[in-house]
């Protein structure tokens, strides 16, 4: 028994580069049949479509989504681990585990990603400087291979294939389920310290010295400030609040968790979008100025601290019909000059949404295609129709790889094969593992074709 | 594959010596471009051309292609795809303008011009459409002409072949809806090029570069039709409905 296909137009979260594929939502028992049935254009898995670019698109081929239920998740409270189908979203998981005193080991900027996607993209969060990326916390996973067999993998069980799958963008096989460790929490609140930094030097200094005392750390940089004020920013550092940190009122139900969506952006946004220098200037003033110079001990709940944008459904529509891209790269420590120059170039170009995110990465994991390396990672949102965007990004690409940095595949929608090749020196090692498990090219995607990954 | 800002990697030009076609190719070249294939009758004479297009990271190839040999189209395309993978943009730019007086005297030469302009274009476009359907993406640019919008006595063999091609492409575009493939019909007016050398320019004459600019703009905007220059659209809206006696007297060459 195999579900029917439908022909679908797919884009990433940035709404760019649409392509058509046959799609189906499948159960674990059906997925093998679909693999046997794949055409020459191959298969890629798609979770919730939150990759910004074309990672979960496969023009002319098959795109499958796993129909998994969180009800089948197994929480081992003694070990502090969770075993769950790869198609389950972090959003669904959180509703189960937070009230039981657990939190996901790595939380990206949105909770609307699946476990399979989290592993395939080896996602990171605000705790990377201390705890690494999602793959660091995966104990085991089962992978459906191109030949139809299912293989158990883990850091100590066929480690090369396991680490090729972590950050492998779905090109080694289909992740069916996984077991990963959780964080124990006493409350569903976070205790947050805020520092407002006058310029980029102050921010570098502050982050380099204070980050390691907090589990979570991220900075928002205001691109509207230039010159001596370049890098004006707000740094938020936080930890999970202990019971003793909570007010008597909050302590009544310390693990209360009820994320809300306050609004959804309608499909009727004008085609040119609503994000522009005016709206951004107003937003930045309101957002950044409301923060005091230094504030300690603010209590925030999980959605407000980790996933503020999730409060607004379909916010990607704000950029209008031309879509947008999220440019994210990392440069090693010691390349602060390059980073400063890039921030300056983006600020001057006025092509970006003037709020960019800066984060310090800690140690990388053994995955040859895993994105994080020790250094600074910067994330910039840009409208794809702004003039000069492409030229700017091509120049930034060169600066990033010349500085020994690299780009995040889960977000990429623009760069070239040569930039990826330079940024990921272990690409060939990964390709050899990939080819060995998929000699006939069953796993394909638009991203893989565009960047010549396979 | 195309990236988020519409830069393409693999371009195929059918009619590899067409000046308008080449101007469009140049406009499509970005740091993302990987392969340009120029399909022309005498690839050995195109060395200078490939040289002028080449740059680091880009492979430019002139390959042998005889548009009139429709039986060979399928194999030709399969070969290009086998060597370079998915085609992002194909430009159908081959065609014969001819001379109406010659056509009047030698109907056989008219047949062969119509065969190239219409029949061979139909064949090539259908082969490309099938490839694009299979790919789930791909853009076809077809050089039509305002000469097909209302056919005039000075070049009605050429004009009628373009009228047929234009109509065919409109239907093809509709049939490709929902497949990921799309068709952009370009309707240039009089364009200064080797094809029109020595001819008296018609009003609102333009250059291959202008046509290319407007074409690539329309391509990125997802349009299905572009007039070059744009004013011709409004001009022909009037000319199309002009009474015959008046139309015949217009000094359109």
Image (spheres, rainbow, N blue to C red):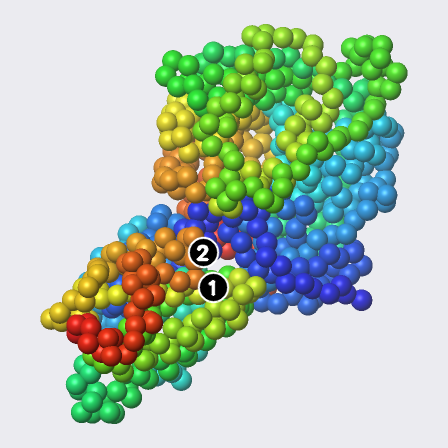
Which residue position holds label 2?
B222
Residue at image coords 43%, 52%: B221
Q: CA distance from mark 2 to mark 1?
A: 9 Å
Residue B146 location, quadrant: bottom left
Instruction: Examine the rendered structure and indicate whether residue B183 appears above or below residue A108.
Output: below
Q: Position of residue A266 (x, y in %)?
A: 63, 41
Based on the displayed image, in which of its 4 quarters is residue A147 positioned? bottom right
Label 2: how many residues lie within 10 Å, few (<14), some (14-19) or many (20+)?
few
Q: Nearer the viewer, residue A390 or A154?
A: A390
Residue found at x 63% / y 17%: A237
Subunit bearing disc 1:
B
Mark 1 neighbour density, 10 Å: few (under 14) some (14–19) many (20 or more): many
Under circle 1, the secondary element is: strand
Between A69 and A32, which is closer to the camera in this rendering? A69
Relative placement, left or right, of A305 versus B61 is: right
Asked if disc 2 and disc 1 are in contact, CB closer than 8 Å, the reply is: yes
A106 sits to left or right of A232 = right
């Amino acid at each position: 028994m195999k579900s029917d296909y439908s022909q679908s137009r797919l884009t990433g979260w940035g709404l760019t580069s649409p392509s058509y594929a046959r799609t189906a939502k499948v159960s674990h028992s059906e997925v093998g049949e679909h693999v046997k049935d794949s055409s020459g254009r191959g298969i890629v898995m798609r979770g919730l479509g939150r990759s910004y670019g074309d990672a979960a698109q496969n023009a002319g081929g098959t795109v499958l989504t796993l129909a998994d239920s969180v009800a089948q998740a197994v929480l081992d409270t003694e070990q502090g681990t969770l075993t769950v189908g790869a198609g389950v979203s972090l959003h669904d998981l959180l509703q189960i585990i937070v009230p039981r005193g657990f939190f996901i080991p790595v939380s990206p900027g949105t909770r609307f990603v699946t476990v399979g996607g989290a592993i395939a993209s080896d996602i990171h969060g605000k705790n990377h400087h201390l705890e690494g990326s999602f793959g660091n916390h995966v104990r085991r996973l089962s992978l459906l291979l191109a030949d139809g067999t299912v293989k158990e993998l883990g850091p100590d069980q066929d480690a090369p294939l396991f680490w090729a799958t972590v950050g492998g963008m779905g090109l080694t096989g289909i992740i069916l389920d996984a077991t990963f460790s959780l964080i124990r929490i006493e409350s569903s609140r976070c205790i947050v310290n805020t520092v407002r930094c006058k310029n980029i030097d102050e921010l570098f200094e502050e982050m380099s010295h204070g980050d390691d005392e907090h589990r979570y750390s991220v900075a928002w940089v205001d691109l509207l400030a230039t010159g001596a004020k370049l890098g004006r920013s707000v740094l938020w550092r936080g930890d999970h609040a202990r019971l003793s940190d909570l007010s008597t009122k909050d302590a009544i139900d310390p693990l209360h968790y009820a994320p809300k969506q306050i609004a959804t952006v309608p499909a009727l946004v004008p085609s040119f979008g609503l994000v522009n220098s005016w709206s951004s200037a107003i937003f930045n003033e309101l957002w950044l100025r409301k923060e005091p110079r230094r504030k300690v001990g603010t209590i925030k709940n999980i959605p407000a601290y980790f996933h503020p944008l999730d409060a607004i459904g379909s916010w990607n529509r704000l950029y209008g019909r031309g879509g947008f891209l999220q440019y994210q790269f990392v440069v090693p420590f010691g390349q602060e000059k390059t980073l400063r120059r890039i921030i300056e170039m983006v600020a001057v170009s006025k092509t970006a949404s003037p709020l960019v995110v800066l984060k310090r990465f800690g140690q990388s994991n053994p995955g040859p295609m895993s994105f994080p390396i020790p250094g600074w990672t910067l994330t910039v949102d840009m409208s794809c129709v702004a003039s000069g965007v492409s030229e700017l990004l091509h120049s930034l690409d060169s600066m990033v790889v010349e500085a020994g940095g690299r780009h995040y595949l889960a977000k990429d929608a623009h760069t070239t094969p040569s930039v990826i090749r330079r940024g990921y020196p272990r690409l060939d090692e990964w390709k050899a593992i990939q080819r060995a498990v998929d000699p006939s090219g069953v796993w394909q995607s638009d991203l893989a074709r565009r960047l010549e990954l396979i | 594959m195309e990236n988020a800002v519409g830069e393409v990697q693999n371009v195929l030009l059918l009619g590899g010596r067409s000046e308008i076609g080449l101007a469009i190719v140049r406009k499509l070249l970005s740091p993302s471009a990987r392969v340009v294939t120029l399909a022309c009758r005498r690839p050995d004479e195109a060395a200078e051309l490939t040289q002028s297009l080449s740059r680091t990271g880009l492979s430019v190839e002139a390959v042998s292609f005889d548009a009139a040999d429709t039986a060979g189209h399928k194999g030709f395309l399969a070969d290009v795809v086998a060597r370079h993978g998915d085609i992002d943009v194909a430009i159908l730019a081959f065609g014969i303008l001819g001379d109406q007086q010659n056509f009047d005297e030698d109907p056989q030469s008219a047949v062969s011009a119509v065969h190239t302009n219409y029949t061979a274009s139909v064949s090539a476009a259908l082969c490309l459409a099938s490839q694009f359907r299979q790919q789930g993406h791909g853009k076809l640019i077809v050089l039509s002409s305002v000469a097909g919008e209302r056919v005039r006595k000075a070049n009605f063999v050429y004009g009628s072949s373009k009228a047929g091609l234009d109509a065919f492409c409109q239907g093809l575009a509709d049939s490709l809806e929902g497949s990921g493939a799309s068709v952009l019909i370009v309707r240039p007016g009089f364009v200064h090029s080797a094809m029109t050398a020595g001819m008296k320019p018609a009003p609102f004459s333009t250059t291959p570069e202008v046509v290319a600019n407007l074409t690539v703009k329309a391509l990125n905007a997802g349009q299905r039709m572009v007039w070059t220059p744009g004013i011709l659209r409004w001009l022909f809206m009037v000319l199309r409905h002009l009474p015959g006696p008046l139309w015949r007297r217009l000094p359109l060459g």
